[in-house]
């Protein structure tokens, strides 16, 4: 979102110096819990074209981590017993 705004407002330096993250961030986002099945998370990321998903503590809005496509690829490529399509 930040990169998109930067590109759209490239010619407006006043905006860039005065804008806050709060005005450009999204509030309705997809999240997962730490116990989520990595296969379901991967499917959601592909379906909605997401590059990462925040991981939130169950029953709260506290972000405890973030998982990215590269994290999933690293897990799949490093564990020969991991079966993504099972």
Image: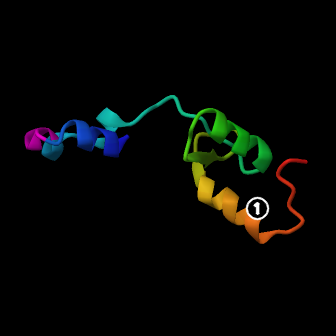
- Is residue 79 depicted above or below 24 in this figure? below
The residue positioned 14% from the left and 38% from the top of the image is 15
Q: Is residue 75 left or right of residue 56?
A: right
Position of residue 49 in the picture relative to residue 74 (left or right): left
Per the picture, the main secondary structure of the magenta-coloured stretch is helix
Instruction: Name which residue lies at 86% across and 68% down.
Output: 80
Tell me residue 71's x, y (percent): 64, 60
How many badges with numbers are in the image? 1
Q: Is residue 82 above or below residue 29?
A: below
Q: How is the image coloured?
A: rainbow
Q: Which residues are magenta?
A: 11-15
- The x, y position of residue 68, in whole percent, is 59, 54
**Residue 45, located in which quarter of the rendered image?**
top right
**Circle 1 — which element?**
helix
In the image, farthest residue toward the top? 28
Instruction: Answer left or right for 79 relative to 30.
Output: right
Q: With 37 as the anchor, is 27 left or right in this view?
A: left
Figure check: 67 above or below 32: below
Q: Tell me the crowding category of disc 1: few under 14, some 14 to 19, or many 20 or more residues within 10 angstroms, Cα based.
A: some
| Residue 18: x %, y % from top left | 15, 42
Magenta-colored stretch includes residue 13: yes
| Image quarter hosting the N terminus | top left
Question: What residue is pinned by disc 1?
Answer: 76
Q: Is residue 46 magenta?
A: no
Residues 40 and 83: in front is: 83
Q: Residue at x 51, y 28 (%)?
A: 28
Q: Residue at x 28, y 38 (%)?
A: 5
Instruction: Please tell me in which quadrant of the rendered image residue 2 appears.
Output: top left
Q: Position of residue 46 (x, y in %)?
A: 65, 39
């Amino acid at each position: 979102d930040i990169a998109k705004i930067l590109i759209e407002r490239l010619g407006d330096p006043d905006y860039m110096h005065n804008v806050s993250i709060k005005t450009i961030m999204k509030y309705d986002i997809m999240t997962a819990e730490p116990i989520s099945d990595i296969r379901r998370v991967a499917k959601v990321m592909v379906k909605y074209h997401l590059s990462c998903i925040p991981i939130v503590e169950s029953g709260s809005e506290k972000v405890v981590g973030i998982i990215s496509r590269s994290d999933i690829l690293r897990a799949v490529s490093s564990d020969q017993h991991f079966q993504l399509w099972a």
